[in-house]
Amino acid sequence: MLLLPVATMVTVLGTQKIIGVFDHADTAQTPIPVASTATISQSIIASAGDHDPADGPSTLQRLSDDIPLAQLKPLEVMDVDLIPQAQASEDIPAASTPAATGTGSTTAPATPLLAATALKSALALGASGHDFAADSDSDDDIGGTSYEDWTSDGALDPSGNPELGSEIASHEQYVPEWQSYTIQPGDSFALTAERTLGLAYSDVTQILGAVPDKKVLTRWRVGRTFDYKLDENGQLLALRVMKNPRDGYLIERDSETAEFAYSPIEKAGEATQRMFSGTVSGSFALSAQSTGLSSAEVSELTHVLSKKLDFRRDARAGDHFQVLVESDMIDGQSLDSKILAAKYEGQRMDLTVVRNSADDHFYTPDGNGLDPAFDRYPFQGHYRISSPFNLRRHHPVTGRISPHKGTDFAMRSGTPIDAPADGRVEKVVNHPLAGRYIVIRHDNGYVTRYLHLSKALVKPGDRVKMGQEIALSGNTGRTTGPHLHYEILVNNRQVDAMRVKLPDSQKLTGKALAAFKRQSENLLAKLDQGNGDEPAIAQVNPQKTQRGDDNI
């Protein structure tokens, strides 16, 4: 019987390796170590020692040449089924040898046996994915993945407990959490509602119909954020949108009707007092802003101090100032700031002012008011007088002498007009010559009139305070251009508003003065402490309550 060379191959986990080559009955039990394909080819050729060279090159020799795979021809097709016959056990005795039998003959076992060490090596080879010659302890062996994903089947558990996976799944409970979305360029509520919130068009229209102020959803600004909450199926449960840092809407889906309803949100602010100290270097406004004051706070500070302090004439480099500011802090943002007290220590002038909570006006520590009882100009800033008070003026249209019993200020339409003193609105009238105008009777008996307005911001009967915005300038009626015509009447007679003697400033007396001094003691003490250049922060108990979602 001709025994052809047979190569036994073992495939473990997708990796195919040749374990041994057997070409003779005497060596059928001896596995040949394999390191590479080239070594196997050389071993096969070396084992063909019985071939006569005169017969030409043997089949095994020809195998060593480079032969295309398509030209290889099978010598014989045979069925090799070693799996049912092969046995691997560390207890299998070694094959019979002359030394073992003592007879000098070799007896091949009836059943071919696969050495246990070879099988173990094959399994290790398939698991490691590299040759036996490789170092099994190298760093390349670290890593890999599982062929079975036990997490996909709750019954599979590598710890040996088949019920653990299902127990974990059964005890997990979905808890909706708030998520935040930042508005990007091109975003709209309808588009974001569909892509991110999973809403249908009918849901979008229902939400827009429920919210009183639709602008909060239809007029988005890039960079602003809103919060939302989804259920385990990706359906919207709640939507939280803020109109401003303080106010907004909470939109929730009813679990029974699946309809959306809103509730108002009002975030509570924590009243916080902040101390700012600085030194004048160049512009006072820039010096104040460099301490950390906002632009609005700098504007208010400059306006308050300028009532007694002429910055162009009195301010000098090196002058020192302290400012105590109170504001509501919401989500780290300062809102509704107002100056409580300020101190200016200069080379030419010292000034300390304190806000009186009773009337919201500023006073010196001894109770003298900064605000005159009647302001000279009914606006902020400076505007050119285009036509002064003149009883002998030539009319610009008719050319005749026509008294001008007011003062005209050249200003663009829409400039804010302020009340020069406390009083009550008597008239808001549209006139063919005077245009839209307002009449205010003040507490000291003076009357003021404002002509050619573009818009009135008050109505008859309204109570106004000094500095309150009452109208916008314009170009209505018979005019040659936009301007404000301003009149002051004393005893129902027009006077020159730029020359008339105005009432003295207000001064606190009696109980009002005593209450103010008690209030100002604490504020003045804080000003004295804030003599450094670093801002100090003092917390005040919150005075407002929060309504709406408790988790806001």
Image (spheres, grey):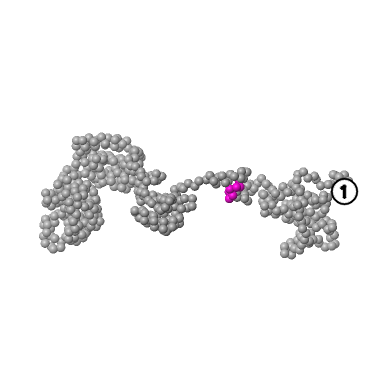
Residue appearing at x 86%, y 46% in the figure: 98
Residue drawn where x is 24% and y is 36% of the image: 515
User: Percent position (x, y) of residue 302?
Assistant: 27, 46
406 displayed left or right of 302: left
* Residue 506 pos. (x, y %): 19, 41
Looking at the rendered structure, the kind of residue marked 1 is Ser
For the point 79% across and 54% down, which residue is it?
A: 22
**Residue 493 higher or lower than 272, as above or below:** below
Q: Is residue 546 above or below residue 194?
A: above
Q: Quadrant of residue 1?
A: bottom right
Please state which of residues 12 and 416 is positioned toward the viewer in this rendering. Answer: 12
Q: Nearer the viewer, residue 446 or 37?
A: 446
Residue 13 image offset from top left, x and y in percent: 67, 52
**Magenta stretch holds residue 152:** yes
Q: Secondary structure at mark 1?
A: loop
Q: Main secondary structure of the magenta part?
A: loop
**Which residue in the protein does label 1 denote?**
105
Quadrant position of the C terminus in the picture: top left
Q: Inspect this view and state whether residue 382 appears.
A: no
Q: Nearer the viewer, residue 487 or 456?
A: 456
Q: Would residue 461 be counted in the magenta stretch? A: no
Q: How many marks?
A: 1
127 lies left or right of 411 = right
Q: Specify the segment rendered in magenta.
A: 151-157
